[in-house]
Amino acid sequence: MSIGTDEAGRPAMTRRDVITVAGGIGAVVAAPAIVSAQGAPRELRMVTAWPKGSAGLGANAQRLADMIDLMSAGRLKVRVFAAGELVPPLAVFDAVSDGRADMLHATPHFHAAKNPSFRFFGNVPFGLTAHEHAAWLRFGGGQALWEEAYAKAGVQPLLAGTTGPQAGGWFKKEIKSVEDLKGLRMRAGGFGGEVLKRMGVDAVLTPPGEIAAAMASGKLDAVEWNGPWNDREAGLHKMAPYYYMPGVLEIGPMLEASINKEALASLGPDLQEVIRRAAAASCWETYCDFTYHNAVNYETLLLEGVQIRTFPADVVQAKARTSEAMLREIAEQSEFNRRVYDSFMTCRRAAARYAQVSDLAQHQARAMALG
């Protein structure tokens, strides 16, 4: 660098020298400031209830993790563990509660044995459809109740998706009456599984990754898993000829990406909001994912000759009577459960009335006009 003197006789630098030194100062001063602000990325461990890479479920858990990484500019890294890689699929809630993991991706009814009120936040037979359920949680007071339900476990619930309406299941023999259900060995989860037990079904909550093997081995006579997409992926259409739809016991099941409250509180407000907003975005993306791929796979199942059946009226009515009685029993167990029940039922009544002139009416009009 060329140094002369200024008018006072002090060393002087040319314009080029100033630019060169300024660049050097920027390199020396600015870079450490960036490192200090960002630091090493924080890793969060997410345990899931889904088989590795499973369509819709495991895939959207990974998408959520990637979204958090991107939205946080790399300050948060979410490491996803498939079912059984860190903890068993039905133990994810306990793992997040006791700190063995930071986040979970599952559905509330997988841990409803801890408190039957959890069922209202995951799925209720003849309850709320997927978008109605999300509306109750977001604007109808459901989220505050959900947070209260999980508070003792130290878990912050976050809605992260829905499969949309599920199918009634695959059966090796036709169901013509309530009597045909009695003694049936069937995989059925959540509240719906408990309803079927009361109706005489030998219902078990087989983890997702074990369903196909149990059906293929003859341990099961029927399987209720999800919808056309996941069911076809599992090969269930090759194991039973009759596919019953709609699945009135799971009309709008919710998915969650809940997080350990201490882990969440240890993050700055901006990163906490990143996680919340990423979960909200994942909710919509997951719903769209299932809606499209269930429709496409349903068409494929029809081309493959699957026999679609609808449950007889007496079976549907028996399911409804049993479910409503069980919901009332849950409400009577505690003051908190009563508050959850009342809130949910208030929303269901309003949603059912509105559906008559909105969603249901639109579907009927489209079918009438287009066939």
Image (cartoon, helix red, strand yellow):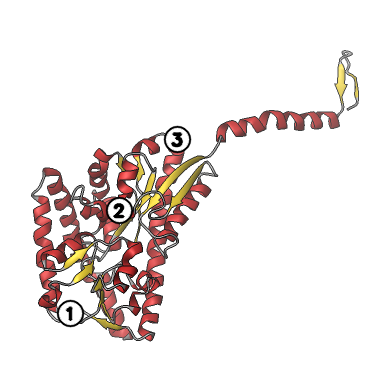
Which residue is under mark 1?
175
Residue 46: image x %, image y %? Answer: 41, 48
Up/down of 15 relative to 167, above or below: above
In this rendering, which labeled residue sits more in front, label 3 or label 1? 1
Give me the disc on residue 90: 2
Q: Are marks 3 and 2 in contact (CB under 8 Å)?
A: no
In this rendering, which labeled residue sits more in front, label 1 or label 2? 2
Which kind of residue does numbered mark 3 sit on? Gly
Q: Disc 3 to disc 2, how far (Cα)? A: 30 Å
Instruction: Determine whether the residue tagged by mark 2 lies in a helix, strand or loop.
Output: helix
Q: Quadrant of the C terminus?
A: bottom left
Residue 303: image x %, image y %? Answer: 38, 85
Instruction: Determine whether the residue tagged by mark 1 lies in a helix, strand or loop.
Output: loop
In the visual, does 210 lie left or right of 42? left
Residue under the point 60% across and 33% down: 35
Which kind of residue does numbered mark 1 sit on? Ile
Residue farthest top in this picture: 8
Q: Earlier in the sequence, mark 3 or mark 2?
A: 2
Residue 204 seen in render = yes
Residue farthest front in this picture: 217
Q: Disc 3 to disc 1, how far (Cα)? A: 55 Å
Which residue is under mark 3?
268
Alpha-carbon neighbours of circle 3 within 10 Å: few (<14), some, or many (≥20)?
Answer: few
Which kind of residue does numbered mark 2 sit on? Leu
Give me the disc on residue 275: none
Residue under the point 31% across and 41% down: 97
Count of numbered badges drawn on the protein: 3
Residue 170: image x %, image y %? Answer: 27, 75
